[in-house]
Image: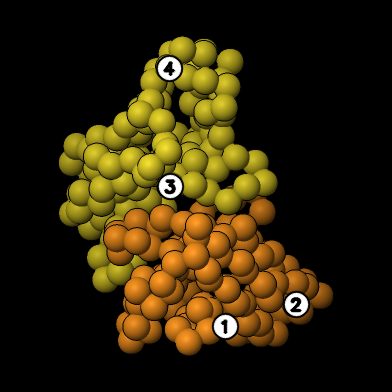
Chain colours: A orange, B yellow
Amino acid sequence: EVQLLESGGGLVQPGGSLRLSCAASGFTFSNYAMSWVRQAPGKGLEWVSGISASGGGTFYALSLRGRFTISRDNSKNTLYLHINSLKAEDTAVYYCVMEVGDTELDYWGQGTLVTVSS
Amino acid sequence: QSALTQPASVSGSPGQSITISCTGSSSDVGSYNLVSWYQQHPGKAPKLIFYQGSKRPSGVSNRFSGSKSGNTASLTISGLQAEDEADYYCCSYAGNSSYVFGTGTKVTVL
């Protein structure tokens, strides 16, 4: 069974930084591309970033490029998202997502809440 | 990349069929037959229910079906049931390993 467990969320001051983690299990992590998707409170879904199975390719939403860095450690079966210069509008639940076919978002974690506030 | 446009809400009575539209552009929906649909119940993570124009993940009811014409994709829920009440999002592959989501539709079962 695919399991994705996000961690690292919490309350952060504006301008701060944060690293989210996603521990994967139940599948061969190094074989699949992964993504991060976020959802602001009461709002819709927004694709944030993706990374290829090997980690050699990284991709970002145009509107978010620059402050977000996606990475993965295939030896630890873990996906990361580093966010710099946090803004109030980054407040959201961040979901870790596994891509089976590289063209849809197949399996989702339960998410981790990031709150940016002073 | 602009969000795909969905109606804010759609409602129907049990047993009826409803259709949710998802309008994008020639850069996303129109370029790829790679629109996927997600169901999200309150407080839960989204769940993939339809993808690649004609596929349903294992365990998803065949009451869910999809189609596409030009820059608009649609999700039809047949035989509406109380458990179908949720938010629904379309999502299109947008090239270069990126995605764009729809604005979301709240489905209410009357």
Callouts 3 and 1 in the same chain? no
Q: Which residue is mark 4?
A: B79
Q: Nearer the viewer, mark 1 or mark 2?
A: 1
Q: Where does the image place residue B79, in percent across and percent down from the top left?
A: 43, 17
| The C terminus of chain B - image quarter | top right
Crowding at dot 3, Cα within 10 Å, few <14 / some 14-19 / many 20+, comes out as many
Callouts 3 and 2 in the same chain? no
Q: Nearer the viewer, mark 3 or mark 2?
A: 3
Question: Could you tell me which chain the residue with mark 4 belongs to?
Answer: B
Q: Where does the image place residue B55, in percent across and percent down from the top left?
A: 28, 42
* In the displayed structure image, the side of residue B49 where residue A83 appears, left or right: right
For the residues labelled 1 and 4, say whether their Cβ atoms are less than 8 Å apart.
Answer: no
Residue type at mark 2 is Val
Label 3's element? strand
Q: Nearer the viewer, mark 1 or mark 4?
A: 4
Residue type at mark 1 is His
